[in-house]
Image: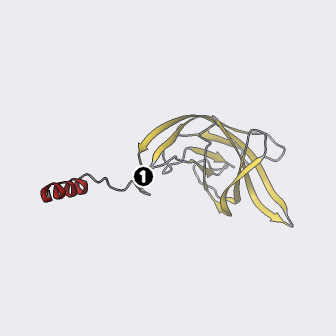
Amino acid sequence: MRYTLLFYLFLSLVCCEPDDICSQSTQTTPRLVIDFYDIENLSDKKSVAGLFAIGINEQGDEINIIGESVETRDRIELPLDGNNSESHFKLYKNYNIVDGIIQGNPDIISVNYNTESIYVSRACGYKNNYSINDLNINNDIDLWIVFSDVIINQVENENIAHVQIFH
């Protein structure tokens, strides 16, 4: 009897599985990375003063704010919607709020893509990778974005830029 109890105790210790924890180093669903360039010298990166992004749903309503602060920077990462084949963003230059009124120059971009769900692990679940079909800049009377170029169609990680925007 004693050996049977020891055998079951040993078996239970050997058969335990490690905790399922998704490591922070594991690549999850990547965001679309956009670098901004100088329209007068196409090879030079150029920061956008007061860059701020807001997501827009299909009805044109602002749905979420991307980021927590307004910054002058030459790169932004935007989350694509894995449940749709198109995402829209309002990118502001010189974003500011004065007395509750938003100021700045917004341009709207639309990204069309295909989504591929990939199993990562039991702890991490699935992630989405995207294949960009095109990126369009909606026309308005005061465009600050002159043109864009999709340089890498496959959005599989956030370590490289996928799109260049010239301003």
Percent from the top left, x then y, of residue 25? 42, 56
Residue at image coords 82%, 47%: 142
State left or right for residue 100 relative to residue 149.
right
Relative image position of residue 19 (x, y in whole percent): 36, 56
Q: Is residue 27 left or right of residue 79?
A: left
**Residue 123 vs residue 17: left or right?**
right
Q: Quadrant of residue 12?
A: bottom left
Question: Which residue is identified by label 1?
Answer: 26
Q: Say which quarter of the image contains residue 22.
A: bottom left
Q: Residue 30 location in percent, x, y? A: 52, 47
Seen from this angle, which residue lies furthest front? Answer: 1
- Nearest the eye: 23 or 139: 23
Residue under the point 74% across and 44% down: 108
In depth, the one of 51 and 26 nearer the eye is 26
Query: Which residue: 44% across, 40% down?
Result: 119
Element carrying mark 1:
loop
Using a 10 Å C-alpha cutoff, classify the residue at mark 1 as few (fewer than 14 neighbours), some (14 to 19) or many (20 or more): few
Residue 10's quadrant in the figure?
bottom left
Q: Amino acid at mark 1?
A: Thr
Residue 127 to residue 96: above or below:
above
Left or right of residue 87: residue 115: left
Q: Picture coordinates of residue 104 (x, y %)?
A: 80, 57
In the current view of this chain or complex, which residue is farthest to the bottom?
99
Count of numbered circles on the image = 1
Is residue 52 visible to the viewer in this orientation of the structure? yes
The answer to whether residue 155 is visible is no
**Quadrant the N terminus occupies:** bottom left
Colouring convention used in this rendered image of the protein: secondary structure
